[in-house]
Amino acid sequence: MNYSNFGTKFTQPNGITQLMEDLGSANASNNPNIVMLGGGNPAHVPQVNAVFLDELQKLVASNKVSQVFGLYDGPTGNDEFRAALAKQLNSEFDWGLTTQNIALGNGSQANFFVLFNMLAGKMSDGSTKRILFPLAPEYVGYADQGLSDDMFVAIKPDIEILNTPSGSKQFKYVIDFGSVEKVLAEDSSISALCVSRPTNPTGNVITDEEVRHLDALAHKYNIPLIIDNAYGDPFPGCIYTDANLTWNSNIILCMSLSKLGLPGLRTGIVVANNEIIKAIGRVNGSMVLSPNAIGPSLVTRLINEGELLPLCKNTVLPFYKNKAEIAINLFDEIFADLPVYLHKLEGAFFMWLWFKDSKITSEMLYQKLKEQNVYIIPGHNFFIGIDDSWEHKHQCVRINYANDEATLRKGLEAIKALIM
């Protein structure tokens, strides 16, 4: 088939498609021996599932479900949900939002495709603009979003080996602000900064001071700061360290209902100034007419009645925090005598392992594990915009620890057997 440039680019193999194909194949196989540690699926939290099932029954009983299924919303998404969310965020953070500051899309992946390609790529004046990731590694799903080649620039992190009270071999990536500022000063093609918080794949939560520093740089160079908050506060609230959420008219804050336990309903949220929101609505109208209404309708009452945030704080957060503690304990036990390091678990639900002196690359490890029905994600896919020659890029893997303890243990022991 002779594809267009668009078709050629988006039909090529890539990291995010590999991840989703692995996840789909594993789910479809019903093979009880598969150890799926590679996908981004949230866990099934029984109490949370029960709440959503109850909300669905309420929609059916009130006949609202017919409206949800049978009518289009506007191109920026469900008005009732947007109003409820604006009121909730204003109550929590005093941001002064209205519905005109919120747009919905069919998942964060779709929203980032729109945002990246609105802000970067080939411009009307013939120039080319690019997105800067101030901290690598970053979310694998960003990598192939650009309609233009070389849309992304990334900065290598500083790597800090941590002294933990327990002696656990942990490290943390820290933003190299000197390099960030150098790129911004010398490269006029940078049109936006983008960082996830917590970061997928590492669970890193950049500090409030780092956020303020990035925000100041964005203002200085008159470019927006995009913050991917899919795992953060106020929902699902998967943050295990001190961190405060911030927003202003120069920040594009992206949120999601997926990590609450609703990934199949594809609901991404953008909080931004009215100009950005209008633009997203116009793109939505062209691409999909109207975003999915089921996810927003399912949680609107929970927001209006003040039930969603307590559910996150009292159920979702403790559930994943306990999972994180189990993951750290298993790591300390299984890799105690090996030169393997764990990125400090500050949020989300991923383990990021660094095989410091391993002779096997992350891609080789991924392929060998896959032969054993153990699925992980090789780390090199997450170092978007970083040259392949950097050895560290090929020494890391991402593991989803939202599974049960026995499954996680089996996967970690399979890794240990291959790297020894």
Image (tube, rainbow, N blue to C red):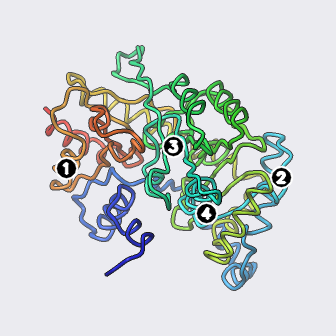
Image quadrant in which you'd find residue 384:
top left
Question: Element at badge 1?
Answer: helix
**Residue type, mark 3 in image:** Phe
Question: Element at badge 3?
Answer: helix
Tell me the distance, in whole angstroms, between the alpha carbons under discs 1 and 2.
Answer: 47 Å
Q: Residues within 10 Å of mark 2 (few under 14, many from 20)?
A: many
Q: What residue is pinned by disc 3?
A: 319
Closer to the camera, 147 or 161? 147
Lower sequence index among marks 2 and 3: 2
Quadrant position of the N terminus in the picture = bottom left
Q: What residue is pinned by disc 1?
A: 369
Residue in the image at 51% along x and 32% along y:
346
Tell me the distance, in whole angstroms, between the alpha carbons under discs 3 and 4.
Answer: 22 Å
Closer to the camera, 399 or 13? 13
Tell me the distance, in whole angstroms, between the alpha carbons under discs 2 and 4.
Answer: 19 Å
Lower sequence index among marks 1 and 2: 2
Q: Residues within 10 Å of mark 4 (few under 14, many from 20)?
A: many
Quadrant position of the C terminus in the picture = top left
Tell me the distance, in whole angstroms, between the alpha carbons under discs 1 and 4.
Answer: 32 Å
- Horizontally, residue 245 falls left or right of residue 359, namely right
Which numbered disc covers residue 267? 4
**Residue type, mark 4 in image:** Thr
Q: Residues within 10 Å of mark 1 (few under 14, many from 20)?
A: some
Q: What residue is pinned by disc 2?
A: 87
Query: What is the count of numbered marks?
Result: 4
Tell me the distance, in whole angstroms, between the alpha carbons under discs 3 and 1.
Answer: 28 Å
Q: Are marks 3 and 4 in contact (CB under 8 Å)?
A: no
